[in-house]
Amino acid sequence: MSSPSNSLKKRNRPVHFPDGRPRSGGGIRETAVVDPFTALPDSLLIHLLSFLPIGDAVKTQVLSKRWQFLWTYITSLVFHVLDPPHTGDDEFVAFVDKTLALCNCSKLKKLAIRFVYEPEYPSSYNRWTQFAIGKGVEEFQLVFEDSLGVLREGDSYLLPQLLYTNSSFKALELAQCNLKPQGVVCWNSLKKLSIGRVKLSEDVIQKILTGSRVLEILELYDVYGFNRLHVSNATPHLHSLEILGVSVHKMFRVGNVSSLVDAILSFNVMIYSYGPDDYDWYLTMLKELLQSLVHVKKITLGNWAIQVLCIMEGKGLCSPLLKCECLTLDTGITKALLPGIAHMLQSSPNLETLVVSVPLPSTISCEYFSDKDCNFDGKHYWTLRKKPFTCLMFRLQKVKFIGFGQHEVDYYLSFVQFILENARVLQKMVITARMEGNNWQKEFTQAAQKLLSFPRSSPHAVVLFSE
């Protein structure tokens, strides 16, 4: 046994770093490492793992024996072909297959798989859909894309028949998936449905709507193969309708859907030439659509719809009076669109919120009709108008411009001036800039100063700017 003096000597020995340098402080004090996750229950750890990308969640299995299988109980699985750890199609498909095979949770809330469509993996696609059905998935996303960016007929995944009789689905998104139900569709719990990049027949659409009795949101984009979209009381709970993408000279009709509160008509029409009868054809379609939406509180219109309204304004035709309280114009402010914007303001006496959102440069729609309909003074268009707008006099309270400066600033300035001078109960105007070039800050500052100098009809109106 060592003496106290020897023990003291050992405790007072100098301590050195591995490279031989002396370490100050004399003795060594070991600090216990406390794991903040040790005291947490497994259920909370699994919940935390659900916020990680699935690849990172799987990696936690190497932390300890306790973590080895925790990730397999995650109730939300999201796979994207661009996310690590996979580097190619084979690796991605294998990763999804293996992950789903190891899943231990009894019920899955969400399964989302986004992958570039490749026809050589049908067995894996079948396993994914069968897994979703077996786990009672509430939100299922199976989104395929074409590697060339061009959808060809036949380049889609044929959904299994079991998928059409599932009462667990509450939200369903299918892209480039071939829908061919042989019997009835029974989606009794489905509230949100999105279908894109696929051929649909009118019979299939009718089966889907008839079998989705509690549907609230319907989104169709880049779909083709039918001549008419007829949404009626087959879906009595439908709250939101979106029609996006491109229509190739097709007629859209919306039936009597009294529950609808939100409608987006932001589709474009592709046609190679316009004949003398095309104007009447487009006028009829848009007028019927607006007639079906007279009760809708929130409406979004795209470039094509605004241009058709320009024709109606030029011909002195009236649109049905809308009960719209929030109107979004998904387009810029150019000379060719001024009459269409005025037409919508005239047709929306209950309007309280107006949003003008300029699309990104890559998505800006072209001008569909000739310049012969633009024979007016665009610079002074608003000051020359004699008809008052009911919404400006009594209802409009908030205006928002998103992408200010993306097009000709003069048309924005004249429209903003017109709003400020005539909106009697306006409370707030928000202007978000999206300007480019070396001098955009200077140009935006000049435009902002000019805007602030405009007189205001409402004493409570506040103008806010943001970049």
Image (tube, rainbow, N blue to C red):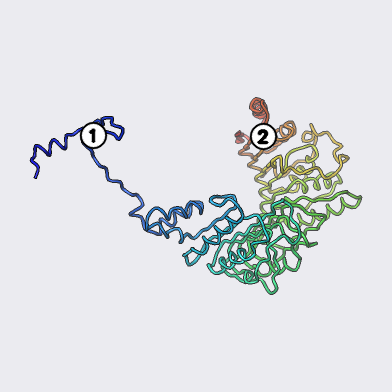
Q: Which residue bears the numbered disc 1?
A: 15
Which residue is at a point 80% across and 34% down the rendered structure image? 378
Residue at the bottom extreme? 183
Q: Quadrant of the N terminus?
A: top left
Per the image, label 2 sits on a secondary structure element best described as loop
> Could you say where residue 105 lies in the image, as x and y percent from the top left?
47, 64
| Residue 358, disc | none
Q: Which residue bears the numbered disc 2?
A: 457
In this orientation, which residue lies closer to the viewer: 58 or 216? 58
In this orientation, which residue lies closer to the viewer: 89 or 137? 89
> Could you say where residue 276 lies in the image, as x and y percent from the top left?
91, 50
Q: CB under 8 Å between callouts 1 and 2?
A: no
Label 2 is placed on what type of residue?
A: Ser
Distance CA(mark 1)–CA(mark 2): 80 Å
Q: Quadrant of the C terminus?
A: top right
Which residue is at a point 69% across and 41% down the rendered structure image? 360
Label 1 is placed on what type of residue?
A: Val
Which residue is at a point 87% across and 37% down the rendered structure image? 375
Per the image, label 1 sits on a secondary structure element best described as strand
Q: Vertical placement of 219 versus 132: above or below?
A: above
Q: Vertical placement of 179 versus 322: above or below?
A: below
